[in-house]
Image: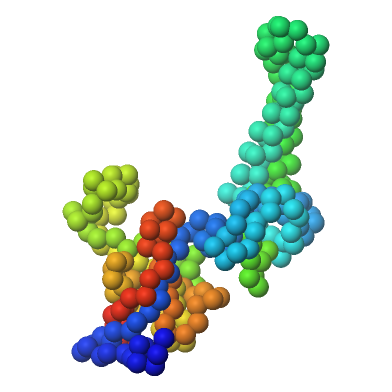
């Protein structure tokens, strides 16, 4: 861009700045976190996500990675216990079915069903589920970890740099497009989120301090509440969307953003 392209035009209490705006959502691909199974007392975890992130980094499942921070909150422990309980019961059931069907024949399905109804197999499944629940809830919690950048391996809290939950911009409920987003309308109706709300914007806080309000064409009003490793300078911002599909629809655009003066 030429020097003139980045000229700021002052309009009363606001100034208009050409900014490259990139949409993002809180899914693991966009934010760079991943689900992970902690390996007990060892400073390692097994990633449970697979795929390529927009940044180009690859998430490899079940390849041990360094864990720099413990994730031992109640949801992580409950999730770990429930997961290992299901896996333990499933393992016993799969072994029983395999042994019953090993003889072959046309009635292997009936043999497998009979094996699962056996009291001994049921008792083993219950024992395995209880052992898995106890082990998972104490030693193998499943939590979210940063998967890239200099904070890889640290716990992902899902909050902004200001400690708030990111919000997608929304109008007052009677202006919500019911035909385009009926599920979202119903969710707002049930959770009593009827008022309008500014969206969450990530920016370089050296140029736009926390609390700075901006109006982005195609997005609406937002507030700077977060930062980003790759967001540098006054001409880059990220816009939060609640769903990845809507973030992909906006994509990356260079638009004239109205910035409110402090």
Q: Quadrant of the N terminus?
A: bottom left
Residue 169 spot, x, y in % from top left = 32, 63
Residue 227 spot, x, y in % from top left = 49, 75
Q: Residue at x 26, y 85 (%)?
A: 14
- Give the left or right position of residue 161, taking residue 134 as reference: left
| 108 and 188: which is toward the camera | 108
Residue 113 against residue 229 in the figure, above or below: above
Image quarter for residue 219? Answer: bottom left
Image quarter for residue 154? Answer: bottom right
Q: Residue at x 65, y 59 (%)?
A: 58
- The answer to whether residue 165 of the structure is visible from this angle is no
Q: Residue at x 61, y 44 (%)?
A: 79
- Give the left or right position of residue 131, taking residue 164 as reference: right
- The answer to whether residue 231 of the structure is visible from this angle is yes
Q: Quadrant of the C terminus?
A: bottom left
Residue 17 spot, x, y in % from top left = 33, 84
């Amino acid at each position: 861009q030429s020097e003139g392209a980045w000229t700021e035009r002052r309009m009363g209490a606001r100034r208009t700045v050409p900014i490259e705006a990139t949409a993002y959502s809180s899914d693991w691909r966009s934010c760079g976190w991943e689900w992970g199974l902690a390996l007990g007392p060892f400073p390692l975890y097994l990633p449970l996500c697979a795929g390529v992130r927009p940044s180009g980094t690859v998430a490899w499942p079940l390849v041990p990675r360094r864990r720099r921070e413990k994730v031992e909150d109640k949801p992580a422990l409950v999730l770990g216990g429930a997961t290992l309980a299901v896996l333990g019961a499933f393992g016993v059931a799969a072994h029983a079915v395999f042994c019953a069907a090993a003889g072959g024949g046309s009635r292997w399905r009936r043999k497998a069903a009979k094996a699962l109804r056996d009291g001994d197999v049921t008792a083993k499944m219950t024992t395995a589920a209880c052992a898995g629940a106890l082990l998972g809830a104490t030693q193998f919690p499943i939590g979210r970890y940063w998967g890239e950048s200099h904070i890889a391996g640290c716990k992902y809290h899902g909050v902004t740099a200001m400690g708030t939950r990111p919000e997608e911009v929304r109008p007052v409920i009677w202006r919500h497009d019911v035909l385009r987003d009926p599920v979202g309308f119903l969710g707002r109706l049930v959770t009593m989120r009827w008022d309008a709300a500014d969206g969450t914007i990530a920016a370089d806080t050296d140029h736009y301090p926390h609390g700075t309000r901006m109006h982005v064409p195609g997005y609406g009003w937002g507030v700077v509440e977060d930062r980003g490793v790759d967001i540098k300078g006054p001409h880059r911002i990220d816009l939060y969307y609640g769903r990845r599909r809507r973030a992909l629809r906006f994509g990356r655009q260079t638009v004239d953003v109205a910035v409110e003066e402090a």
